[in-house]
Image: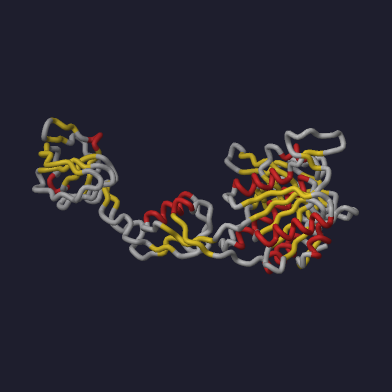
Amino acid sequence: MIAPAEADALIAQHVTCLPIESLPLVQCAGAVLRENIYAERDQPPFDRVAMDGYAVATAGLAKPRSLIVQAMQAAGDPPLTLTSPGHAIEIMTGAVLPAGCDAVIPVERAERKDDSVRFPDPGKLAPGWNIHPRGSDVRQGALLLSAGARLGAPEIAVAAGAGMPRIRVSAQPTISVVSTGNELVEPGDPIAAHQVRRSNAYGIVAALRRRGFDRVAEHHLPDDLDTLTRRLRMQIDTHEVLILSGGVSMGALDLVPEALAALGVREVFHKVAQRPGKPLWFGIAPSGTAVFALPGNPVSTLVCLARYVFPALYAAMGETPRPAHKIALGAAYPSKVPLAAFLPVRVSIDEWGRPWADPSPTNGSGDYAALTGTDGVVELPPGPNDFPKGFVARLYPW
């Protein structure tokens, strides 16, 4: 068996980068950027008013006095020009600073009467007060976003601010989720005492969709070699990623590796020194389709999905690797196995604002009910070992 880090390296060596597509900006949330984006203009592109109030020339306010309100300027209006230091211009947040003005007094410090305004207590008035100077955030041509960034709300807003109606991003992979097993019965269908509900595929698809992967199909195949081979050929031919659940252990009906071999899928590795999820299988089809065959026990399935499949998908989309998310154990945990251990945890915040990974172990790899309320798993080194409270481990969110 190989270690989890070796499995990472082998997956990285064999997963190929997905193609690029140009999409409207509104469709790019969660996508991975495949071009650099530069500032269209200085930001702010003008001396921007930061408060509702009155634009004034500070030279005209050496002492408290009343000024004539010359006009009102809203955001989006062309800039006015102050006619004299004895005048003020009513101004709105986001507007261009009028010519001849060098400060803005907030409206709450003003006393307005008809066409005049008085400032009994203008505050520490000085040139530049309540003004966001042109170019103080970003200069025209500056790099705003680098290729490889995953696009969330701030990044989408930045691209829009740079005048980009469309951007080049990684195409989403087409993914087929296949669960195998004669014992599986759909939710809602009649079920016998010796059967189990088909749940893994629903969990996998939910996790994929939560991360923005929409090009997902899902299927259920029986433990029959001919059927598996025929139906998996179709999935491999029409999808870029295949995620299977079940059929990869040592039983007589664990037929997935044999079916994949018959289709020319090259095995890269089978079995990882970890618990749960030891039977994990990974290979590459002649077409380049990446095949992740996950163990069928539901805890093992979700562990392998979070630990290996999601990082591989983002790597294939060209995402710049993110720093490992590390967290301290909130309680001691004994690990008895000489394998890497994946421990489900609930993340809590103490009174000092510190995050902790509180152990929430399952009653075996079939105990998926114990995962409710957990936030992911931490990876612990091979034991036997008693990991103390405060031991720092990497967190893999669901």
Q: Quadrant of residue 105?
A: top left
Q: Is residue 338 visible?
A: no
Residue 309: image location, x then y, percent: 68, 56
Display coloring: secondary structure
Residue at x-position 65% and y-position 61%: 240
Position of 94 compared to 56: left or right?
right
Q: In this view, does 359 lie above or below 9?
A: above
Residue furthest to the right in view is 252
Position of 154 compared to 197: left or right?
left
Quarter of the rendering occupied by the N terminus: bottom right
Residue at x-position 63% and y-position 53%: 325
Position of 77 compared to 365: left or right?
left
- Which one is nearer the viewer's eye here, 204 or 227? 227
Residue 21: image location, x then y, percent: 50, 62
Residue at x-position 18% and y-position 36%: 119
Residue 18: image location, x then y, percent: 59, 64
Residue 56: image location, x then y, percent: 17, 45
Residue furthest to the top in view is 113
Q: Is residue 113 visible?
A: yes
Q: Quadrant of residue 282?
A: bottom right
Position of 350 compared to 380: left or right?
left
Residue at x-position 81% and y-position 46%: 334
